[in-house]
Image (cartoon, helix red, strand yellow):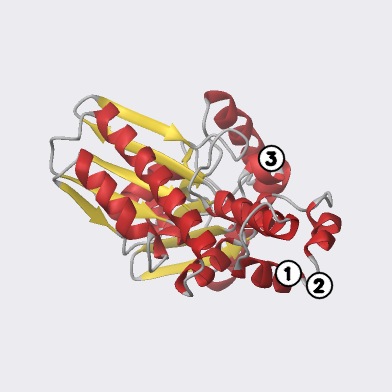
Amino acid sequence: MQQWFLGIDGGGTKTEALLGPDHRHVTWGNAGPSNPRAIGIAVAAQNVRIAILAAEKSSGRHRPYKAVIGLAGMDTPKDVTAMYRTLSKALRGMLMPGWKLVNDIVIALRSGTEAKHGAVIIAGTGSNGFAVGPKGIARASGRGHRLADEGSGYAQGLAALHAVTKADDGRGPKTLLTKYVLAHFQVRKPIELIQIVYQPNFGKPSIAALAPYVQFAAERGDKVAREILKTAAYELALLATTIIKKSGLQRKSFPLVTVGGIFKCPIILPTHFRSVVKQAAPNVQFIRPKLRPALGAWKMAGG
């Protein structure tokens, strides 16, 4: 019987599953977020299962699978142990013994390079950094939105909400973000946002969903939005330079893989980010991976 492989990429916005025996015969499945810090461990595990079932719907069942599951929020041994236990129950019968659960930053690096040494920055709903260099492994950020996530979609979305509030109060300049945020939530006045943002189900993904409006406003010359992007670029560059130095890469030639929707921003952020990182590591090679992180996990599983 032919061996099938499973790769999972789960973050604060969505979960992707890649299933197949070789690169010519793979199917994809999607589900909601699976970062347990954002939505809870039970819901995260259920969304992983839903993504696998969606992939199986197209491919048929060929269980059990050799699997690597990469999830956001796997930052401590305790996180991994708790999630591994929950997934083992939720995915009983689906996975072969020896399947691996890793932080999504690990599969993100693999999606962009197979080099021995390298670094990766994720900037999507949250932010995280990981590097492997002559001095070993280095990590930074990746501790959730209450302790870190600077430069992320969440950080930008929260900055947008603050900017709209300040503009409404008169404590800050007028901004196009007011128009975009009000339209997004279908309200007429900033004061009405109170009834929305303090609802129990209004969390990190809802705030991160505002990040594209920062880019839209910045492209139209909005000074407030442009400052938000500059701040995000600086924070992500600080994240990168920190792991580069800690892992001993600053004098090396190495790939820096940039993953996540924030790096798709067409103005300000990529230029500022690259400029600051280049000062610390002149020989860095910036890579936007051609492969999605789930494919990196699939390859790690043996595909």
Taking the image as drawn, is residue 28 in sight? Answer: yes
Residue type at mark 2 is Arg
Q: Which residue is mark 3?
A: 41
Can you tell which mark lies on residue 188?
2
Q: Could you say which is closer to the camera, residue 132 or residue 24?
A: 132
Q: Residue furthest front?
A: 170
Amino acid type, residue under disc 3 in the picture: Ile
Task: Work out how far the residue at label 1 is from the one at label 3, CA to CA, in angstroms.
Answer: 32 Å
Q: Is residue 84 above or below residue 26?
A: above
Task: Give the labeled residue for mark 1.
Answer: 182
Q: Earlier in the sequence, mark 1 or mark 3?
A: 3
Q: Is residue 148 left or right of residue 45?
A: left
- Numbered label tally: 3
> Which label sits in the foreground, 3 or 2?
2
Asked if one can make out residue 49 in the rendered structure from this viewpoint, the answer is: no
220, above or below 265, in the image: below
